[in-house]
Image (cartoon, helix red, strand yellow):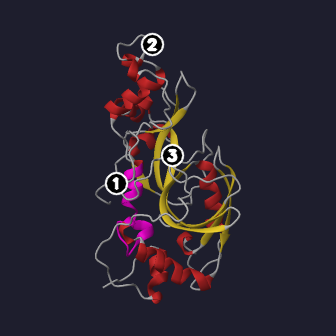
Amino acid sequence: MPPNRPATSRVTDFSDPNVKAGFSERPERFSGVDGHTYRCRVMTLPVEYYGAQVKSLATGKGFFAHSDANIDDIIAALKDNDPEAFERCKQQCELFARGYQVGPRFAVLLYVASETAPRKVTVNRMWPWAFGGQIYNQIRQIVETLPPKPDGKPMPLASIELQMQCTDANWQKWTITPIVDKAMHVSNVLKVIDEFAHEFHDPRNPARGGSPLVDEFIAPEGRIHMAASLDRAEGKGRFAAGSSDPGDAVGGDPVQQPARGGRQSAARGQPATQPATPARGATQPRQTKPREAEPAEADVENLLNGDGIDLG
């Protein structure tokens, strides 16, 4: 397990047929614009984590709060109906203790190559992308219908591009179509991994190695800060009406103040609610690290299988 991955999440895959669409499908990092089409790649396996949608009683606006209960206890409580695990979750997490409807989310590292609206614009950036059961099942169906590789092994998701058209920007609804082109995927994937190697825990094995950017994004903020965020939304404690500290009263926009504390990505410095479209012609800062030897194209099949490649 990468050292920074919180115990509140786990790496999974796109093979679970029991994932249900949740009450909200709003992504919290990458977001699309109505009618815009994006060419993307899902570069990592999905990380499963849990949380709840929180709404301010004063403004009606809300945010998604990440649960800080242990992932094993959450699964035992919600999927196995284990009452002892549920009690442990209540002790660990304010969302469980206050009776919020806790459900699963998934996060991947998404490479966005271009955006068309209607003119095509190069994007060439990575974002954490969070989604619920509806999008999970769309991608699962794509994975299940991909043609196998010549050796009979499953086609890895990172080896293809996805054409993603945003049909509803408010609820982030998508029409996702796979683009399978053997001629293009080898060189393109190697180029992306080489350019964004710092975004992966293990560039030799990016799909299974995971991403520090995703780990930072899904990390909960801790119970004390969670309690303060929920008090703000619920108008309780020092945020109640008549509080001696009116500057902290509910009435701000909790979408801009998520329960995670509004942390920004250290790698990109973008707010969690920032749309994916960068400023036209803007130069994006990039982290650098000593360049490793580039993998040979012959190694790409192992890399995309999650078997890793030899860069040395």
User: Within 10 Å of the Cα at label 2, are there few (<14), some (14-19), or many (20+) other Cα atoms?
Assistant: few
Question: Where is residue 250 shown, x and y percent of the image?
Answer: 46, 22
Left or right for 30, reference 198 = right
Q: Are marks 3 and 2 in contact (CB under 8 Å)?
A: no
The residue to which callout 3 is attached is: 273
Residue 200 in sight in this render: no
Give the spatial CA distance, label 3 vs label 1. 22 Å
Image position of 154 with respect to 138: above or below: below
Depth check: 207 or 162 in front?
Answer: 162
Asked which quadrant contains residue 142, the reply is bottom right
Left or right for 173, reference 257 = right
The residue to which callout 2 is attached is: 241
Image position of 244 with respect to 14: above or below: above
Disc 2 residue type?
Answer: Ala
Q: Residue at x 40, y 35 (%)?
A: 85
Question: Where is residue 260 shown, x and y percent of the image?
Answer: 40, 40
Per the rendered image, the range of residues in magenta is: 199-217
Image quadrant holding the N terminus, namely bottom left
